[in-house]
Image: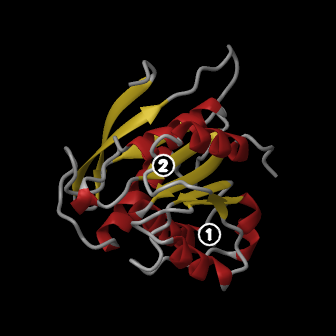
């Protein structure tokens, strides 16, 4: 665990939610770019905020100067409640965003990221928040299209969005992700020879995400 990682708990819609906050190393007088909230894969198949891809996403944001927030959906780890097929998990995600980056007093940018089931939930969070506040960076990895009804992304957010998918993903076929993206004219970055969990390719994932989230904010 990063020595600057803070264990946190907050009140969610179904009870307490367990979270970890990773803080960047900054020079005196510097402040974080913003807050990035990262959603983990499927709760019923071992998904948690300790997932290696989720940890890699957090490291990428932290390297680019962001504060990264990982959390466990309801029913995972110390988070209270039970699995709710994405509906309650969306409310969990929105509660975490509101807690760590409240719209009325947010200082700095807002970033959202999700892996697999977490990308599905994050897409609906974008849909819920887009008209209310700016989303400065969005990263979706192994988006669970075909398995869930992943929401379309607003056209004006495409320039701030990075969608990554492994060519040899046997959990969410690349064809399903492309079918979801095609109707939106949304670019997808395909990583040749890479599977769903990016085994052996986590450093590449980190570098690609860091490059995206470190770009100057509009």
Q: Can you name the residue that lies furthest to the front here?
A: 193
* Residue identifier under label 2: 198
Residue at (70, 18) in percent of width and height: 29
Q: Which residue is at 43% across, 67% downward? A: 121
Question: Left of 18 or right of it: where is 187?
Answer: right
Of all residues shown, which one is farthest toward the bottom? Answer: 183
- Left or right side of 183 for 117: left
Task: Determine whether 95 is above or below 209 in the image.
Answer: below
Q: Is residue 5 toward the left or the right of residue 58 in the image? A: left
Disc number for residue 130? 1
Viewer-side residue, 132 vs 115: 115
Tell me if residue 45 can be seen. Answer: yes
Dot placed on the residue nearer the N-terminal end, 1 or 2: 1
Q: Contact, CB < 8 Å: mark 1 with mark 2?
A: no
Secondary element under disc 1, as helix, strand or loop, is loop
Q: Quadrant of residue 2?
A: top left
């Amino acid at each position: 665990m990063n020595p600057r990682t803070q264990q946190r708990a907050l009140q969610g819609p179904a009870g307490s939610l367990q979270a970890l906050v990773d803080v960047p190393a900054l020079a005196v007088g510097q402040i974080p770019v913003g807050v990035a909230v990262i959603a983990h894969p499927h709760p019923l198949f071992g998904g948690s905020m300790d997932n290696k891809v989720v940890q890699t996403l957090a490291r990428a944001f932290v390297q680019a100067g962001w504060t990264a927030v990982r959390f466990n959906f309801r029913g995972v780890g110390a988070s209270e409640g039970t699995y709710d097929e994405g509906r309650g998990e969306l409310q969990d995600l929105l509660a975490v965003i509101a807690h760590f980056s409240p719209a009325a007093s947010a200082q700095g940018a807002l970033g959202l990221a999700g892996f697999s089931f977490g990308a599905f939930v994050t897409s609906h969070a974008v849909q819920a928040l887009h008209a209310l506040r700016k989303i400065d960076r969005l990263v979706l990895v192994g988006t669970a299209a075909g398995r869930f009804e992943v929401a379309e992304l607003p056209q004006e957010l495409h320039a701030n969005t990075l969608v990554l998918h492994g060519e040899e993903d046997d959990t969410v076929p690349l064809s399903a992700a492309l079918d979801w993206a095609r109707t939106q004219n949304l670019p997808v970055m395909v990583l040749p020879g890479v599977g769903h969990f990016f085994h052996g390719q986590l450093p590449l994932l980190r570098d690609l995400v860091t490059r995206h989230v470190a770009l100057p904010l509009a």
